[in-house]
Image: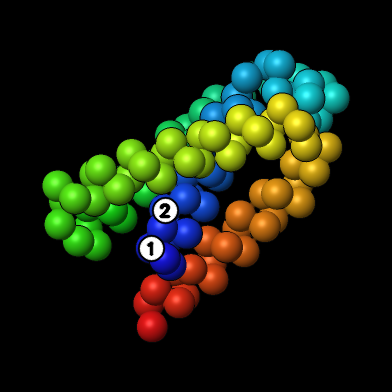
């Protein structure tokens, strides 16, 4: 369960970062568009988080099983992010904070 929460939280953060790279969502979250450099940074951070989640899956078990696990976590993370952006976008920073807390706690508990 901790492994799933770790991968899910990291993937959700990656998808939120990728959403921040889109003009429509920038206006939704910040009421303005970000600069080109900030947009590019959001894109890079989003892809980096998704790749880190994949690398964690590959390193913490059987790669063939964990790739499927990663795709499952990506699916649930994408659904979560889509629903959050559509219905509760005003709580964007609280959701990001909660995801960071879930990620840190699951990483600590997975270590022990």
Return the residue at label 1: 3
- Compared with 104, 39 (above or below) is above
For the point 51% across and 34% down, the residue is 78
Tell me the SS state at disc 1.
helix
For the point 52% across and 61% down, the residue is 103
For the point 24% across and 44% down, the residue is 67
For the point 33% across and 45% down, the residue is 70
Alpha carbon distance from label 1 to label 2: 6 Å
- Which quadrant holds the C terminus? bottom left
* Residue closer to the observer: 93 or 70: 70
Return the residue at label 2: 7
Q: Where residue 4 sits: x, y (%)?
A: 41, 58
Horizontally, is 101 left or right of 62 in the view?
right
* Residue closer to the observer: 79 or 32: 79
Q: Residues within 10 Å of mark 2 (few under 14, many from 20)?
A: many
Colour scheme of this structure image?
Answer: rainbow
Q: Is residue 67 visible?
A: yes
Q: Where residue 12 sits: x, y (%)?
A: 53, 43
Q: Where residue 93 sits: x, y (%)?
A: 75, 47
Numbered label attached to residue 37? none
Q: Where residue 9 sits: x, y (%)?
A: 52, 52
Location of residue 42 (image quadrant)? top right
Query: Mark 1–mark 2 contact, CB under 8 Å?
Result: yes
Tell me the SS state at disc 2.
helix
Q: Is residue 55 visible?
A: no
Location of residue 32 (image quadrant)? top right
- Which quadrant holds the N terminus? bottom left
- Compared with 70, 42 (above or below) is above
* Residue closer to the observer: 18 or 109: 109
Q: Residues within 10 Å of mark 1 (few under 14, many from 20)?
A: some
């Amino acid at each position: 369960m901790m492994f799933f929460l770790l991968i899910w939280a990291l993937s959700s953060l990656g998808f939120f970062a990728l959403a921040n790279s889109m003009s429509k969502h920038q206006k939704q979250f910040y009421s303005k568009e970000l600069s080109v450099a900030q947009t590019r940074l959001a894109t890079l951070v989003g892809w980096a988080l998704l790749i880190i989640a994949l690398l964690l899956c590959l390193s913490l078990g059987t790669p063939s099983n964990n790739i499927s696990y990663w795709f499952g976590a990506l699916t649930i993370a994408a659904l979560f992010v889509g629903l959050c952006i559509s219905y509760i976008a005003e709580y964007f920073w609280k959701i990001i904070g909660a995801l960071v807390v879930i990620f840190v706690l699951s990483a600590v508990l997975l270590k022990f």
